[in-house]
Amino acid sequence: MNDPTVSPQKLVAASLKRERSRAGISLAELARRAGIGKSTLSQLESGDGNPSIETLWSLSVALGIQFSALVDAPRPLVEVIRLGDGPTFGASEADSYTATLLSAARPGTRRDAYLIRADRGKPRLSQPHARGVVEHVVLCSGRADVGPTESPVRLEPGDYVNYPGDVEHTFDAVEDGTVAVLLSES
């Protein structure tokens, strides 16, 4: 469904079928709830209709979903980012710390996930983020001192820590090849 050659009518058709199936209601029942003709709904689900905004709005209300669920291409259920892929920050020869964005916060959420790779050397000092931000770190390999700059904790592989991200904090690898997953939320 992320194919730009798919017409809006086909996108709406697929979305209607998917959402009606999820709701577990018949074509006739959805048409009744939305106040539209069964034949109109049948045409829309086959991709032959050209619905008005009012019709789509009525259908979204009848299905109990956001309007956008009928007109926006669905996101994949499973998303994979292979090691080495994804936007990476801090990847210069002078840096011993890189962060690869794994998952940006989607609308309505406030969390980002990163894969951290760091070598011994210069600790990564981060200035305070917005008030209420909390960072979660799971160390995958290596060892690192992580947390508020005034009181970081030593992490070993498999260890987890969370700390306020709205204070100055650090990630200081004490072994080359240190890898961690960082989740930032507010």
Image: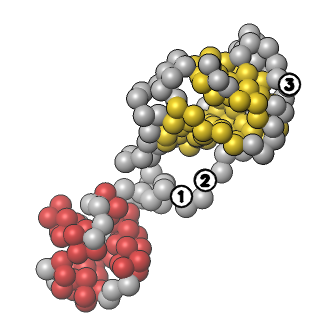
Q: Identify residue for label 2.
A: 79
Q: Is residue 175 visible?
A: yes
**Residue at horizontal 32%, vertical 88%?**
26
Above or below: residue 149 compared with residue 76: above
**Residue tagged by mark 3?**
176
Disc 3 or 2, which lies upstream in sequence?
2
Q: Name the secondary structure under disc 2.
A: loop
Residues at marks 1 and 2 touching, judged by CB atoms closer than 8 Å: yes
Please identify, in this view, whether the residue under mark 3 or under mark 2 is nearer the observer: 3
Q: Position of residue 117 (x, y in %)?
A: 74, 30
Compared to residue 63, the image places residue 104 above or below, namely: above
Q: Please tell me in which quadrant of the rendered image residue 73 appears.
A: bottom left
Q: Mark 1 packing: few (<14 Cα in 10 Å), some, or many (20+)? A: few
- Looking at numbered disc 1 in the image, what kind of residue is underneath it? Pro
Which mark is first along the chain, 3 or 1? 1
Circle 2: residue type:
Glu
In this figure, which residue is indicated by the disc labeled 1? 76
Q: Amino acid at mark 3?
A: Asp
Q: Percent x, y for residue 126? A: 57, 19
Distance from label 1 to label 3 (Cα)? 35 Å
